[in-house]
Amino acid sequence: MGLPIALAVASTAVGFFGSMSAARAAKRQAALQARMIKQEKQRAALRALQEHNARLTGYKSALGTNIAIAGVSGRAISQDRSLKAIQNRFKKEMATETDRSFLQNLSEQAKLSAQQTMVLEKGRNLSKAYQYQAFGTLFSGAMQTSRLMGTSTIPVRGTGLGTQSYIT
C-alpha cells in the first residue's frame, strides 16, 4: 500500500470518526438544552405558585381588615349589605386573578414543552445529518482509494440492462 492510499484511508477514517463524534455531540447538546428547559418549566410553576400565595395573602389581609372595620364600627357583617358587597367583590376579584394566573401559567408551560420538544427534535435531526455525512465520507474515501489503486471502472449491476461500467 503506497503513501497516497494510506493517506486516503486515514483521511476517510478521520472524516468518518469526526462526523460520528459531531453526531453524538449534537445529541448531548440537545439533551442538555432540554434539561435546561425542563428546569425553566419547574421554575415557572414555582413562580406561579408563589404569586398565587402572595395574592391569597393579600386577599386574606383585605378580608381581615374588612372584618376589623366591621367590628370597630359595631356592624354585623352578616347583616350589613355594604360590608357583604365588599367581601363579595374581594372574592370575585380573587377568583378572576386566580383564573388568569392559572391560564397564563398553563400557556407558559405549553410554550416551554413545545420548545423542549423542538430542541430534542432539532438535535436528533442534526445528529442524523452528521451520521449521513460520516457515511458519505466513507463512500467518498472508498471511491478515492479505488482510483488510487488503479481501478478505472466501476461496475453497475441490477438495472435490468446488464452490466455497464462508467469510467471515473
Image (spheres, rainbow, N blue to C red):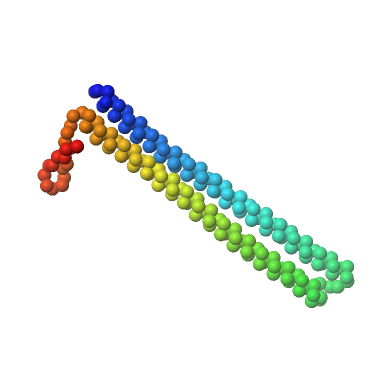
Count the numbered circles shown: 0
Which residue appears at 63% of the width and 52% of the height? 46
Residue 140: percent from left, percent from top = 28, 36
Which residue appears at 40% of the width and 43% of the height? 127
In which quadrant is the N terminus drawn?
top left
Furthest-left residue in this view: 162
Whether residue 126 is situated above or below residue 110 in the rendered picture:
above
For residue 73, what is the image quadrant? bottom right
Residue 123: percent from left, percent from top = 44, 45
Furthest-top residue in this view: 2
Whether residue 31 is situated above or below residue 105 in the rendered picture:
above
For residue 151, what is the image quadrant? top left
Furthest-front residue in this view: 168
Whether residue 85 is situated above or below residue 140 in the rendered picture:
below
In which quadrant is the C terminus drawn?
top left
Q: Which residue is more in the foreground, 91 or 168?
A: 168
Which residue appears at 67% of the width and 56% of the height? 51
Residue 138: percent from left, percent from top = 30, 36
Quick check: 20 left or right of 32?
left
Residue 92: percent from left, percent from top = 69, 69
Which residue appears at 38% of the width and 34% of the height? 18
Q: Which residue is more in the foreground, 48 or 141?
A: 141
Quick check: 83 left or right of 113?
right
Q: Which residue is more in the foreground, 19 or 120?
A: 19
